[in-house]
Amino acid sequence: MVKKIRKRENRKLAIVQAEKIKKRLRENRDAFGLTTPQAGTSFKHIKNKHKRSQMVQLMKQEKKKQKAKVRRSRREAEARGEKVERQEPCSIDKMREPDETIVPADDSEVEEDEAMDEFEKYFQGGKKPKILVTTQKKPSRKMYAFLKELVCVIPNCFYYPRKEFPFKKICEYASNRDFTDVMLFHEKAQVLQGVYISHLPKGPTSYWRITRLKLGQEMKGGASCNASHNPELILNQFVTRLGRRLARQLAALFPQRPDFEGRRTITFHNQRDFVFFRHYRYAFKDKGEKCKLQEIGPRFTMKCRYLQHGTFDAKSGEYEYIWRPDSQVSRKAFFV
């Protein structure tokens, strides 16, 4: 406790000291009539590293002031009723490299393929999902806290302890007991690492890396929900053939007939091949004209590392997709 207080005090002193240095530097430049450096100015001629970093900081501050001034003038013009031309922001998503696997809106060939895949009977309402959830051997207390919330998120979800059974035997057991999917979570040093999702009885199997986990009990002002109501499902920006297949696997974990009385929404939002999981409860305001979102939790980020044909088979399994660091050297190349 004493160390935390001391660190906090040292942080405050460092901020105050930095502000004093900035003020003194600004006064000295004003005294000698020196102008503030503009964006793009080079400071290679300054040999002192400390002075050079101060000049770079001054340049960044001036650039930020100019941007704020332009933004303020644009808002004032809009308030006066003038027409303001807004440019489209340039992001990495907009500069995405062309990919031949991106599926158009009305592609009959892809729709026919999906009508014969392993998940079609769930979307037709012919079979209700039934999920078996397990973990690695000897899970930690944090894993149990996460599973306690996950069981409330996914309807018809049952936890079975791992004990000493291998994953392949668990898939066979679940298939004989009429389970539709198996989810196996594993951790390292009491930190959740990833999840294996195996669709039964004929696959496919995917492995997702999980990061940035935050439980609902850790969220300030989080909401509670009625787990008996089926949630509404939202899947965003799964545009390639691989992305649509992964999205269908994730959607097959949930019932396809939501209960709107529960006002519960689960979102899988794909951005740059990272899938953001969010769990919300919505409430209408002003006689239905506005809608307010309240997060229930948990929240985490997923990234697909591989997709395998059939159920889990580490030795002789055939892979549909494997992510490798050298396959995504370009920041503008996406697969999902």
Image (cartoon, grey):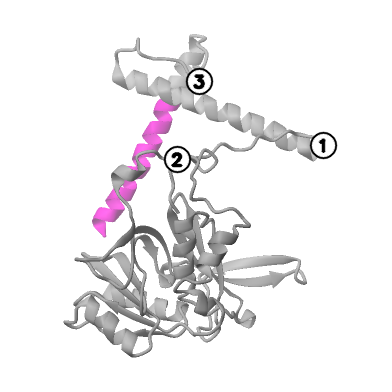
Residue 282 visible within the image: yes
For the residues labelled 2 and 1, the Cα–Cα distance comes to: 40 Å
Q: Tell me the SS state at disc 2.
A: loop
Q: Residue at x 61, y 76 (%)?
A: 263
Residue 160 visible within the image: no
Q: Residue at x 36, y 69 (%)?
A: 204
Q: In which quarter of the image is residue 10?
A: top left
Is residue 17 rendered magenta in the image? Answer: yes
Q: Left or right: 57 with respect to 167?
A: right
Q: In which quarter of the image is residue 182?
A: bottom left
**Quarter of the image where the N terminus is located:** bottom left
Q: Which of 5 and 255 is in front in this view?
A: 255
Q: Earlier in the sequence, mark 1 or mark 3?
A: 3
Are there few (<14), some (14-19), or many (20+) residues within 10 Å of tag 3? some
Residue 191's disc is none
**Quarter of the image where the C terminus is located:** bottom left
Residue 80's disc is 1
